[in-house]
Image (cartoon, rainbow, N blue to C red):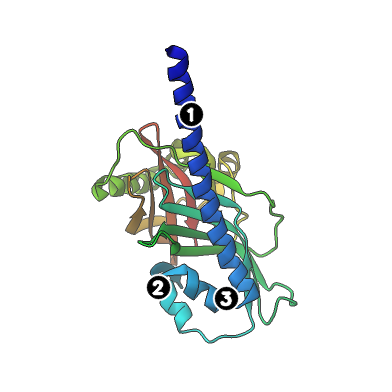
């Protein structure tokens, strides 16, 4: 009997793992199709086809509607190209996050890139089951860096108990903001996981906890964060909080991606631009 039970558990775990793999591969395919449309057709057509009509973004430190921004742009020959490098998916399978390198060319793909950086996109499945970008943010850096062709994947473990109260999620973000103001080094170190990833403007992406810890003093300690809103998965295993990041007179914006692991909230990603 014990053998049969053990085999049944293995079968369940194998099916669950296969399903998670299918979900994250589906998200990767959507990101790649998004990029392919931009490269082969136009960047405007790509954004209008893949972003949600209420997609949140930032421009000059102010929140904007990404869909409307692209709707109002004129078609031209400029090209924005990109590829996923790190992909995250919730255990509920309807929320994901992608990040990776981007390049911008002014007139055509034959031009030399005049700008480069890393994008970060939050995805949600709509009522039709199609992935749509609901948040889009990027950083830039002065020189092109080498990027791995391998896509790093992170699947959030299913929580023991679902969390649907927004107040509990917001409290996690506010607690971190207070801790950062007191001691930014300790605040960050306490919530890192090995796969944590930081995209900070004008810096090379910090692609794991070791890289973050090595560069932690380069993150301005006097940055004051003000949360605006959040985007959460259906079962509350993951949420993205975003808002204003003020460093002296410099107004920027931020996004933090929190994941629940072993009944604790951990910081899987932070973007500041």
Residue positioned 46% across, 37% down in the render: 16
CA–CA distance between discs 1 and 2?
46 Å
Q: Viewer-nearest of labels 1 and 2?
A: 1
Judged left or right of residue 145, residue 58 is left
Instruction: Find residue 267 and report its horizontal and vertical position in percent.
Output: 44, 44
Task: Identify which residue, 21 or 67, lies in the foreground.
Answer: 21
Residue positioned 40% across, 52% down in the render: 94
Q: Is residue 26 above or below residue 18?
A: below
Q: Is residue 193 above or below residue 167?
A: above
Visible in this render: residue 58? yes
Q: Earlier in the sequence, mark 1 or mark 2?
A: 1
Q: Viewer-nearest of labels 3 and 1?
A: 1
* Kind of element beneath mark 3: helix
Q: Earlier in the sequence, mark 3 or mark 1?
A: 1
Q: Count of labels shown?
A: 3
User: Residue 43's mark?
Assistant: 3
Q: Is residue 2 above or below residue 108?
A: above
State if disc 1 and disc 3 touch (CB < 8 Å): no
Count residues near mark 3 (Cα–Cα under 10 Å), then give few for <14, some for 14-19, many for 20+. many
Residue positioned 36% across, 45% down in the render: 176
Visible in this render: residue 247? no
Instruction: Find residue 141 and report its horizontal and vertical position in percent.
Output: 62, 63
CA–CA distance between discs 2 and 3?
18 Å
User: Residue 64's mark?
Assistant: 2
* Kind of element beneath mark 2: strand
User: Residue 44's mark?
Assistant: none
């Amino acid at each position: 009997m014990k053998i049969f039970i053990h085999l049944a558990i293995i079968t369940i775990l194998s099916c669950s793992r296969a399903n998670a793999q299918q979900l994250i591969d589906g998200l990767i395919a959507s990101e790649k199709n998004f990029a392919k449309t931009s490269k082969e057709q136009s960047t405007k057509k790509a954004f209008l086809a893949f972003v949600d009509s209420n997609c949140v973004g930032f421009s000059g430190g102010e929140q904007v509607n990404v869909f409307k921004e692209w709707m109002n742009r004129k078609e031209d020959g400029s090209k924005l190209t990109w590829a996923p490098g790190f992909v995250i998916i919730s255990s509920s399978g309807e929320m994901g996050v992608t990040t990776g390198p981007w390049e911008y060319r002014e007139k055509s793909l034959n031009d030399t890139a005049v700008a480069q950086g890393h994008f970060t996109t939050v995805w949600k499945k709509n009522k039709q089951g199609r992935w749509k970008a609901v948040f889009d943010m990027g950083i830039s850096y002065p020189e092109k860096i080498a990027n791995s062709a391998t896509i790093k994947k992170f699947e959030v473990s299913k929580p023991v108990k679902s969390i649907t109260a927004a107040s509990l999620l917001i409290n996690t973000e506010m607690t971190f903001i207070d801790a950062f103001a007191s001691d930014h080094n300790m605040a960050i170190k306490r919530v890192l996981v090995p796969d944590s990833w930081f995209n900070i403007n004008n810096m090379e992406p910090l692609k794991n906890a070791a890289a973050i810890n090595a560069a932690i003093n380069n993150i301005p300690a006097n940055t004051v964060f003000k949360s605006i809103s959040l985007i959460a998965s259906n079962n509350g295993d993951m949420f993205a909080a975003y808002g204003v990041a003020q460093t002296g007179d410099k107004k920027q914006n931020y996004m933090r991606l929190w994941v629940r692991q072993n009944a604790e909230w951990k910081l899987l990603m932070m973007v500041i631009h």
